Image (cartoon, rainbow, N blue to C red):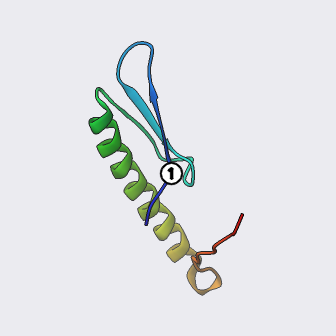
């Protein structure tokens, strides 16, 4: 699955990264490549936590995907 990332150069150096679809996924790195690697890990961790939260709800909840045309 692909996610949209905002990659920003920071004034004090390095880069920050945030996932638009998962606002909880935020990271940084000294280089663009490091920031992208780190945001990928952050996204994976957020998804793991969300999956555990859904499991805790039992059979009353599920995760689904929807597609919206602009």
Up-down: is 11 above or below 66?
above
Residue 38 locus on image (x, y percent): 32, 43
Q: Nearer the viewer, residue 53 or 1?
A: 1
Residue for point 46% across, 69% down:
52
Most extreme residue toward the top is: 12
Q: Nearer the viewer, residue 63 or 2?
A: 2
Most extreme residue toward the bottom is: 59
- Res. 7 image quadrant: top left
User: Within 10 Å of the Cα at label 1, are there few (<14), some (14-19), or many (20+) other Cα atoms?
Assistant: few
Q: Nearer the viewer, residue 38 or 70?
A: 70
| Number of numbered discs | 1
Q: On the rendered structure, is 30 left or right of 43?
A: left
Q: Label 1: state its secondary structure.
A: loop
- Res. 15 image quadrant: top left
User: Which part of the image, by quadrant, shows the C terminus?
Assistant: bottom right
Q: On the rendered structure, is 58 left or right of 47?
A: right
Residue 5 locus on image (x, y percent): 48, 45
Residue 62 locus on image (x, y percent): 59, 80
- Res. 10 image quadrant: top left
Q: On the rendered structure, is 19 left or right of 68?
A: left
Residue for point 69% across, 69% down:
69
Residue annotated with mark 1: 4
Residue 12 locus on image (x, y percent): 40, 12
User: Which part of the image, by quadrant, shows the N terminus?
Assistant: bottom left
Residue for point 57% across, 47% down:
23
Residue for point 39% across, 55% down:
45
Up-down: is 12 above or below 34?
above
Up-down: is 64 above or below 21?
below
Up-down: is 26 above or below 49?
above
Most extreme residue toward the right is: 70
């Amino acid at each position: 699955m692909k996610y949209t990332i905002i990659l920003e150069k920071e004034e004090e150096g390095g880069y920050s990264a945030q996932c638009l679809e998962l606002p909880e996924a935020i990271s940084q790195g000294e280089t663009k490549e490091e920031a992208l690697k780190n945001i990928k890990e952050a996204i994976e961790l957020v998804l793991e936590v969300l999956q555990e939260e859904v499991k805790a709800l039992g059979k009353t909840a599920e995760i689904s995907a929807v597609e919206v045309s602009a």
